[in-house]
Amino acid sequence: MPSFACTVLPPYPRSDRVRRLLRRVEELGEASLLEATRAVIEDSVMLLGVQVAAGVDAVADPLIDWHDLLRPFAEAWRGVWIDGLNRWFDNNFFYRIPVVEELPDPQRLVTPPRVRALRGVLPEWVKLRVTLPGPVTFTRLARIREGLDPVKVAERVAEILALEAEKSVANGASIVDIHEPLLGDIDAKPEDSELAARLASVIASRVSGKAVVRLLTYYAPPRPEVWEKLGDAKVDAVMIDYVDAPSKAEAALDKWAPRRLLLGLVNARSIYPEDPRRVADEAKRLAYKYNVEELVVATSAPVDLIPLRYAVEKTRIACEAARLASL
């Protein structure tokens, strides 16, 4: 019989208070950095509690101070600078474009200090999860200097992220999530997936036997010829978005289904609540259909595209569905 768990993809959305304070600091200069930092910390602790209470498989840093998934890393690396805004895939969400002038070189690490801080406020029995941008997604969304090989850039990004993972696990993280939403894009090619699988394996090799490493695709299920290439990734689990296009997701899973699967069954881009029982029934049906050993009921994407109170409700729904599926 398969086992069931639940997870929610960060970042979480900001509360009105945090959003206003950050704007007053960054755009208007009318609030103190200390005041904004205090609000971010208070809301982050609240969201840690939400996840613990819901019963997620591992608590994620809410990342409410991150503007997007790429920027904190780009700002920490030599040879990379941040340019203007661009739209993130088909979402009403924008990110600052990383401009890669030379192969990146880290000035500082991003996630290990955050893991140490969170480990200090969480009970010892609570597992902690780290969020990393996928090397292929980072590179494809970046602007690469002419003459610089994008594959070499992606390989260098993977090396840096492997160090991020290694140090984060040493500081107490139990799960490392590698986010590769590019693979769900209609323009993604099988060679993108092959590269993503190879570079995820590089990251996973640094923490092998010490942490679970998962490769996450979302915003749409990858096309079957893209998805099946992820079977070569030496990671512990892979995620596919189901709820946005069920027939396409099943077409991909018919090609290949991992033994440990994260399934995006709770819509992260809709405020309307799902019935946990129906989600549980669908999770069980798919787990048996694809002979999955462990199925993790997940949000279909990061929950930062909906207001905070709905993101909290989606957290509850995902975990209630996993509990019901386990009965």
Image: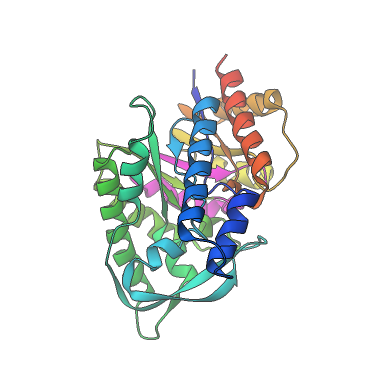
**Residue drawn at point x = 56 percent, y = 53 percent:** 222
Residue 229 covered by magenta stretch? yes
Q: Position of residue 253 (x, y in %)?
A: 55, 41
Nearer the observer, 277 or 121:
121
Nearer the observer, 110 or 150:
110
**Residue drawn at point x = 34 percent, y = 43 percent:** 117
- The total number of labels drawn is 0
Does residue 316 lie above or below 163 as drawn?
above
Does residue 54 lie above or below 239 as drawn?
above
Quarter holding residue 281: top right
Residue 236 covered by magenta stretch? yes
In the image: residue 25, left or right of residue 236: right
Q: Describe the colour scheme in one phrase.
A: rainbow
**Residue drawn at point x = 33 percent, y = 27 percent:** 124
Q: Position of residue 46 (x, y in %)?
A: 53, 36
Quarter holding residue 259: top left
Does residue 44 lie above or below 297 as drawn?
below
Q: Position of residue 21 (x, y in %)?
A: 58, 57
Residue stretch in magenta: 218-244
Does residue 14 lie above or below 5 as drawn?
below
